[in-house]
Structures are given as C-alpha cells and as structure tokens.
C-alpha cells in the first residue's frame, strides 16, 4: 500500500472523513503543499504528526475543506431563487424548511435568511446550516464579516440587516440569525434531514469523485419533499437529473417530481 493510502486510512480514523471519495489529484496537491510548508518530507511523517498534534490536525482539516464564500455569490442565481423558485415553494408550505449544505463561514445561510425575510410570499422559514469544519462553523455563528464579503449585497439589504461595527466590519442582525441553526455534518457519512423544501449545496461537489457525487445527489433527492428544489453551484450542472428523480426548474435549480 502506498503512503498516500496509509495517510487516507489514518485520516479517516482521526476525522471520520474518507478521502477516497474526493478527487485524489486535488487532495494530494493540497496536502503535499501543506506538509512541505510544515517541514515534513512525506505522507507517513505528516500522518504521524497529525496523530499527536491536535492544532495541526485542526489546521489541516481547515485547509482540506474549501472555505471560499461571500454574500449573494453569483448574484443572478439568487435573483432566480427570489423571483421564480421561492414563489413555487411558497405555494405548498407554511414554514419553509431549508438546508444550506457545506455552508462554510455562513455567508450563504445568512443570504438565504435575508432573501426569505424580505420575500412577500414567504410566511415563515427555518434554515439548517451545516459544515464538516468546526472552525468555520464557529466563525459562521458569530455573524461578523469584513466589508469585502459584502460586495454583492444590495445597499438596502446591507442597511436593513447588518450593523456596521467600524470602518471595515459588519455584523448580521439577530432578526436574520434567529432563523438559522448551525450544525456539524459530513455529507458523505452522516444522515440527511428529511422533508426539505430547498437544499442549497454550491461549489463543493466539484471536489468529490463522480461516484460520491451520485450518492450525494440521490440522498439529497430523497431528502426533498415532492416539488422541493436543489440549488447547485455554477460549475455543478447535473446533466441527467432524471437519474435522481429530479427535473430542471432553471439553470442550476432541480425540482423533485412525483
């Protein structure tokens, strides 16, 4: 067995994350860059260090998970959600139940909460926001962001739902935070919520193998209510949604049909 596979086995024992389900070349590149910077020569030495050093393990987990996020990322897709998808979902549900999967530092679930709070057809909603990385979840729960994360936020939304702390930082108001529950979750290993109206999972599945992606899409489809919608990232178009009991509702939006 090569050193990388030995590392994969140790990593799974330490974190519960199976790197065999991620694209190997990308993971190797990221790990090799990190252990070089830390002064290790190979996967074997790095794995031994991770077993003994919790801080290094946490840092490596943070590096392995892809934490790139901003409010209203790809703004046009949020307009489609607001103007086309939410009216569809609001017809069939009093309280919308939404899952923001792999939510990173929280910009996505807070964007959802702001959008839903200002939507005339949405009566009530709850958002479950999950990520595999404890560190980013702690950051998300604080709801405090540098102004560069808010570049795509419309001025009226910024004024209504954020408190400006100083020249550079903004904090999300409690009326937006109260709708969101943050939880740790492993997309590849943990059970999924059921009876969801909307799942938002963007810009994370590109790092998984095709087999892992298919398994996740099947689980997400089974988690949706009839007519519920899956919203994916701009590099994650599903070319055969019917395999998962889905049909295209718009570009990057897929609806579960009975």
Image (cartoon, rainbow, N blue to C red):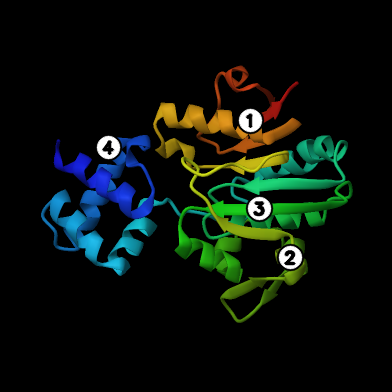
- Identify the mark nearer the N-term, 1 or 2: 2
- Identify the mark nearer the N-term, 1 or 3: 3
Determine the secondary structure under disc 1: helix
Determine the secondary structure under disc 2: loop
Residue 211 visible? The answer is yes
Say which residue appears at 32% left-offset and 54% top-offset. 14
- Identify the mark nearer the N-term, 4 or 3: 4
- Identify the mark nearer the N-term, 1 or 4: 4
* Front-most of residues 229 and 163: 229
Quadrant of image for the C terminus: top right
Cα–Cα span, label 1 and label 4: 29 Å
What mark, if any, has residue 128 been given in the picture? 3
What mark, if any, has residue 116 been given in the picture? none
Cα–Cα span, label 1 and label 3: 17 Å
Tell me the quarter of the picture where residue 55 sits.
bottom left
Q: Which residue is under mark 1?
A: 221
Residue 181 lies, in percent from the top left, at 66, 59
Quadrant of image for the N terminus: top left
Dot 2 surroundings within 10 Å: few (below 14), some, or many (20 or more)?
few
- Identify the mark nearer the N-term, 3 or 2: 3
Q: Which residue is under mark 2?
A: 178
Q: Which residue is under mark 4?
A: 25
Q: Nearer the viewer, mark 2 or mark 4?
A: 2
Determine the secondary structure under disc 3: strand
Say which residue appears at 56% left-offset and 18% top-offset. 240
């Amino acid at each position: 067995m090569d050193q990388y596979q030995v590392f994969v086995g140790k990593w799974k024992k330490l974190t519960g994350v199976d790197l065999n389900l991620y694209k190997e070349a990308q993971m190797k590149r990221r790990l090799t860059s990190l252990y070089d910077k830390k002064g290790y020569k190979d996967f074997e030495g790095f794995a031994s260090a991770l077993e003994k050093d919790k801080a290094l393990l946490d840092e490596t987990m943070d590096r392995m998970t892809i934490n790139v996020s901003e409010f209203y990322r790809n703004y046009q897709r949020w307009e489609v959600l607001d103007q086309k998808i939410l009216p569809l979902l609001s017809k069939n549900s009093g309280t919308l139940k939404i899952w923001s999967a792999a939510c990173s530092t929280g910009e996505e679930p807070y964007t959802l909460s702001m959008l839903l709070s200002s939507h005339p057809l949405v009566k009530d909603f709850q958002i479950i926001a999950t990520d595999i990385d404890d560190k980013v979840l702690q950051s998300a729960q604080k709801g405090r962001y540098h102004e560069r994360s808010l570049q795509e936020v419309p001025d009226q939304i910024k004024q209504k739902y954020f408190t400006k702390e100083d020249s550079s930082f903004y904090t999300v108001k409690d009326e937006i935070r109260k709708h969101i529950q943050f939880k740790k979750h492993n997309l590849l290993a943990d059970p999924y919520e059921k009876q969801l109206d909307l799942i938002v999972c963007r810009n994370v599945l590109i790092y998984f193998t095709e087999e892992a992606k298919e398994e996740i899409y099947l689980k997400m489809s089974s988690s949706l209510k009839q007519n519920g919608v899956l919203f994916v990232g701009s590099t994650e178009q599903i070319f055969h949604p019917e395999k998962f009991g889905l049909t295209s509702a718009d570009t990057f939006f897929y609806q579960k049909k009975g």
